[in-house]
Amino acid sequence: MFFFSGIKRLLVGRSLPTSAHAEERLNNFAALAVLSSDAISSVAFATEEVLKVLVLAGSAALGLSIWVAVAIVLLLLIITLSYRQTIRAYPSGGGAYIVARENLGLYPGLVASASLMIDYVLTVSVNIALGVDNLLSIPELQPLRYLKIELCLLFIFLIMVANLRGIRESGRIFMVPTYAFVLIALITIASGFYQEAFGNISANPPAIQAAEPFIVR
C-alpha cells in the first residue's frame, strides 16, 4: 500500500483539501491555454479533413473552403457570446448541466451533460490518434508505426496524469504546447504572406483531378 501511495504522490502530487480550491485558480494567461486547447487542437486537424473532402471534387471545389471557414468563425462567435452570458448569469460557476437544468428542465440538463461526456471522450481519442499519426509521419519515426496504439495509450496516460495534478499545475503544463502551437501558426501565416508578397507562390497551381463525384444539394 505504501508503494502505490508513493507512486501516486510522485505522479499527481499530494492530495489537496477542499479549502485549497481557491489557491488552484488560474490567471488569464494560463486559463487561456487550458480552455482554448479544444478549439486549438481542432485547428490542427479539422482544416486538413475539410480539404480532404473538398479535394475529391478537384481543385475548383477548394474555393468552398472559405465558406466553411466563415461558418466555423460564426459558430465560435456564437459560443463566445454564450459563454459571456453564462459567466454573467452564473458568476460562481455554471456548467452545461446546471444552466440547461435551471432554464430548460431536468432532461435537457441530462442531455447536455451526456453530450459533454461523449464530446470529451471523442476529443481525447481523435486528437491523440491524429497527433500520433502526424508524429509518425516524420521519416525518422517511421519504425515506430507498429507501436501506434501503444503510443496513443501512453499520451492519454500522460494527459490524465497532468490533469490529476490539479488545475494550476495542469495549466502550467498545457501552456507550453498551446502557445508553441499558436506561435508556429502565426509564423506559418506570416511566412505565407511573405512568400505571396515576393511572388514566390505560383499563381497557377497544378490541377487536381476529382477522385469521386461531388454533388452539392
Image (cartoon, helix red, strand yellow):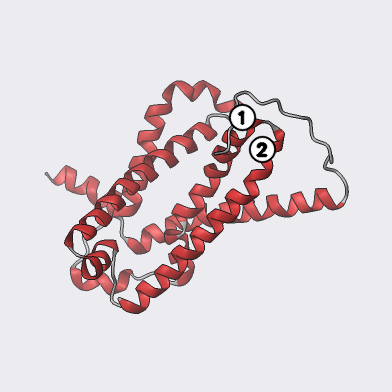
Residue 179 lies in what quarter of the image? bottom right
Near mark 2 (Cα within 10 A), the count class, few <14, some 14-19 or many ≥20, is some
Q: Which residue is mark 1?
A: 56
Amino acid type at circle 2 is: Ala
Whether residue 210 sits left or right of residue 31 in the image: it is right
Q: Is residue 100 visible?
A: yes
Q: Secondary structure at mark 1?
A: helix
Q: Which residue is mark 2?
A: 61
Q: Is residue 98 above or below residue 111?
A: below
Q: Secondary structure at mark 2?
A: helix
Amino acid type at circle 1 is: Leu
User: Which of these two is toward me, 68 or 16?
Assistant: 68
Q: Is residue 72 above or below residue 86?
A: above
For image coordinates 24% across by 66% down, the residue present is 104
Q: Residue furthest front?
A: 217
Is there a contact, CB below 8 Å, between mark 1 and mark 2? yes
Q: Disc 1 to disc 2, how far (Cα)?
A: 8 Å
User: Which of these two is toward me, 170 or 116?
Assistant: 116
Whether residue 141 sits left or right of residue 202 in the image: it is left
Near mark 1 (Cα within 10 A), the count class, few <14, some 14-19 or many ≥20, is some
The x and y percentages for residue 152 are 39, 34
Residue 96 lies in what quarter of the image? bottom left
For image coordinates 39% across by 74% down, the residue present is 85
Q: Quadrant of the N terminus?
A: top left
